[in-house]
Amino acid sequence: MTTDKYDLLGPALAKVGEEAMAIVGGKPDAVYLYVEIGEGWVGPSLFKDEGNAVRYIDIGTSDIWRLLIDAWCIEPTDKRWTAMHYTIEGGKFDAQFEFDDLEGSDESTDDRRERVLHARYGDKPVIYPPMPAGSMELRPKP
């Protein structure tokens, strides 16, 4: 019996969900993981819908990035996704993939993430942790 890639991808994505829930804690519901990935890099952003607002969850020292790379590498090189929308609702996960050329895009990762969050949550506020002491926020010149 040959192994289908889905026999490998399903369990790999389940591990991603387990790690996301270990980070978020609580009931496995209302969790959203947005991931952008390419050769040699991965950018996960984890969120929890709290009803009146959506909270960004810092992944800290979690190994979730390695689990994401492992899942991504299951795909053949010419069929690898560039973005994943991973949701956990009612204890079950769902993963949707995009195959755009992110590195050739004029849109930054931050801009894409904000666009994706707005499409998903509308005008619901997104709460990010405060910037660390001593850091500077860079803004483009008007």
Image (cartoon, rainbow, N blue to C red):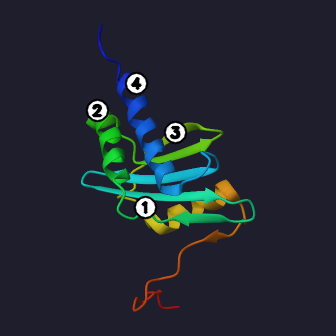
* Residue 98 visible at all: no
**From the viewer's perspective, is residue 42 above or below residue 81?**
below
The furthest residue to the top? 1
Q: Which of 80 and 61 is in front in this view?
A: 61
Residue flagged by tag 1: what amino acid is it? Ile
The furthest residue to the left? 40
Question: Which mark is drawn over residue 59?
Answer: 1
Q: Upstream in the sequence, badge 1 or badge 4?
A: 4
Which residue is under mark 4? 6
Q: Which residue is drawn at 48% across and 43% down?
A: 17
Expressed as whole percent of the image width and height from the top left, the position of residue 76 reads: 28, 32
Residue flagged by tag 3: what amino acid is it? Ala
Question: Which mark is drawn over residue 95?
Answer: 3
**From the viewer's perspective, is residue 3 above or below residue 47?**
above
Q: Residue at x 30, y 41 (%)?
A: 70
Q: Residue at x 43, y 37 (%)?
A: 13
How far, Cα to Cα, is label 4 from label 3?
Answer: 13 Å
How far, Cα to Cα, is label 3 from label 2?
Answer: 18 Å
**Left or right relative to 51: residue 11:** left
Label 2, secondary structure: give it: loop
Q: Upstream in the sequence, badge 2 or badge 1?
A: 1
The furthest residue to the right? 52
**From the viewer's perspective, is residue 120 above or below residue 124?**
above
Instruction: For the N terminus, give its image quadrant.
Output: top left
Residue flagged by tag 4: what amino acid is it? Tyr
**From the viewer's perspective, is residue 25 above or below residue 71?**
below
Which residue is under mark 2? 76
How far, Cα to Cα, is label 2 from label 4?
Answer: 12 Å
Badges 2 and 1: C-beta atoms under 8 Å apart?
A: no
Q: Upstream in the sequence, badge 3 or badge 2?
A: 2
